[in-house]
Image (tube, rainbow, N blue to C red):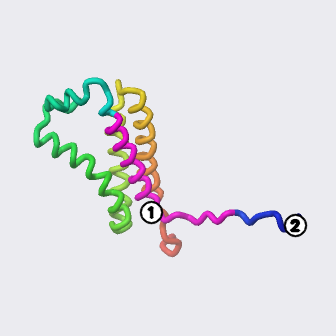
């Protein structure tokens, strides 16, 4: 049975930019599902129809613009992680990864179980983004 052993699977190293883009994309899916499932909470749709956005209060153009900007940043980071020059991308990912982990931690107290579940995943993903960017590999020829 000498020929029955299979060669190990190839597991190439993933470029840090691709890894960061994938982390941001995963984070965005968790955000979307958390917001979508939140629509099933009792009273949520009635509040929306009354023009209220918990916990921000009355819906105004400013509130909608602010929340849109807050959600646009992670969505744009999927692309920007790939397109920005490495030094800029590194710092943007470190700062924004930590910032979005903090935002999630601030929104989690008192949340329902499904939101806590997704929130923990979102915090882990955000911190992983920051950690991955912080540990951005350097060129071997630049060491010295």
Give 135 or 105, whichever is nearer the viewer: 105
Q: Up-down: is 87 above or below 62?
A: below
Determine the secondary structure under disc 2.
Answer: helix
Q: Main secondary structure of the magenta part?
A: helix
> If you read the primary sequence from the N terminus, does the residue marked by circle 2 or circle 1 appear first?
2
Residue 136 position (above or below residue 120): below
Q: Work out whether 9 lies above or below 71.
A: below
Image x and y of residue 96, in percent: 33, 50
Q: What segment is highlighted magenta in the picture? A: 9-37
> Which residue sits at x=48%, y=67%?
138
Residue farthest along the bottom direction in this orientation = 141
* In magenta stretch: residue 30: yes
At a point 16% along the width and 31% down the height, the residue shown is 49
Secondary structure beneath label 1? helix
- Please tell me in which quadrant of the rendered image residue 42 appears: top left
Res 109 quadrant in image: top left
Is 97 covered by the magenta stretch? Answer: no
* Residue identified by numbered label 2: 2
Q: What mark, if any, has residue 18 been given in the picture?
A: 1
Q: Position of residue 38 (x, y in %)?
A: 32, 33
């Amino acid at each position: 049975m000498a020929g029955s052993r299979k060669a190990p699977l190839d597991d190439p190293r993933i470029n840090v930019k691709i890894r960061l883009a994938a982390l941001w994309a995963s984070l965005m899916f968790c955000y979307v599902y958390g917001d979508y499932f939140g629509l099933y909470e009792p009273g949520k749709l009635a509040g929306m129809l009354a023009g209220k956005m918990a916990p921000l209060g009355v819906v105004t153009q400013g509130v909608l613009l602010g929340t849109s900007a807050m959600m646009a940043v992670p969505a744009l980071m999927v692309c920007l992680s790939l397109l920005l020059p490495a030094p800029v991308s590194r710092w943007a990912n470190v700062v924004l990864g930590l910032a979005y982990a903090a935002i999630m931690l601030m929104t989690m107290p008192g949340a329902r179980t499904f939101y806590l579940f997704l929130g923990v995943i979102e915090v882990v993903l955000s911190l992983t983004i920051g950690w991955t960017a912080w540990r951005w590999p350097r060129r071997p020829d630049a060491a010295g």
